[in-house]
Amino acid sequence: MLTLGIETTGKQASVALLDGGTILAHRDLSDRGRPDTKTLPVCVQQMLRQQDIIAGELDCLAVSCGPGSFTGLRVGLVFAKTFAYTTAVPLVPVDTFAVIAGRLNPPEDCLHSAVVEVVEDLRKGQIAWQRFSYCDNKWNPEAAIEVSDIEVWASLPRENVLLSGPTIERILKQLPESSGFFPAGIIPEQKRSPDATVVALLGQNELSQNGAVHPFELRPLYIRRSAAEERRAGK
């Protein structure tokens, strides 16, 4: 299955081209350590040309749909929806937290634990979080994404639960020393961000199990309003 994976929700945007489980090409979209999503169309065009693939020959277009960076998320989804609509390639959205969890390969990445909690700093003392358990050779969400005050989240029981997510350090710095928060472990930094290869792999599975979505029906997964929207609401 020829699959194009697009990830633009994090600080390390990327694009990957897979043939089943084989990686044909992978590129990071970054400029001086920041995501450079404006190069996405050219990067995809070059990647397909180098592999001698016509856009319409793809079997699946998988894109991370959030939560994540507002600007990056919008750029990635607009490109994916336009690409899928004009080429008729099946479009599959993949939740970004599932992509982060999907980067882990038990048991070598997870030691003794088969449960990982993906967290995202929402600022203003709140975080979004979601737990995944490993079963049947895949990470399965235990529940929907939740939004909690940091102190409330820190007080929850999490024995043998590993933490992942690109903003973990920022979250931990906001906890008072008296919180008594001691995680079982934190996933290494290089595996705490979403990646296009995992987006493509999860997209293939989703397409096989549940089919594609119509480009006009795809919506970003937002769990809070943007700063501009909050300022407007405040007025």
Image (cartoon, grey):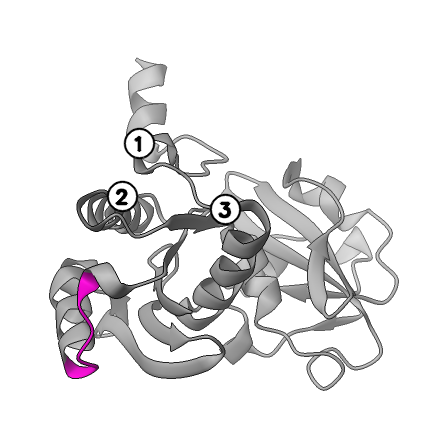
Circle nearer the viewer, 3 or 1: 3
The x and y percentages for residue 219 are 39, 34
Residue type of the residue flagged with mark 2: Lys
Residue 52 belongs to the span the image colors magenta: yes
Taking 27 as reference, is 158 left or right?
right
The stretch of residues the image draws in magenta is 50-55
Residue 46's quadrant in the figure? bottom left
- Give the residue number, with chain letter if any, for mark 3: 211
Q: In the rendering, which numbered label is found on residue 216?
A: 1
Q: In the image, what residue occupies the spot 88% across and 62% down?
A: 159
Asked if disc 2 and disc 1 are in contact, CB closer than 8 Å, the reply is yes
Q: Amino acid at mark 3?
A: Gly
Question: Which residue in the protein does label 2 denote?
Answer: 81
Residue drawn at point x = 68 percent, y = 81 percent:
109
Badge 3 crowding class, 10 Å Cα cut-off, few under 14, some 14 to 19, many 20 or more, is: few
Dot label at residue 35: none
CA distance separating discs 3 and 1: 15 Å
Q: Residues within 10 Å of mark 2 (few under 14, many from 20)?
A: many
The quarter of the picture where residue 33 lies is bottom left
Secondary structure of the residue carrying tag 2 is helix
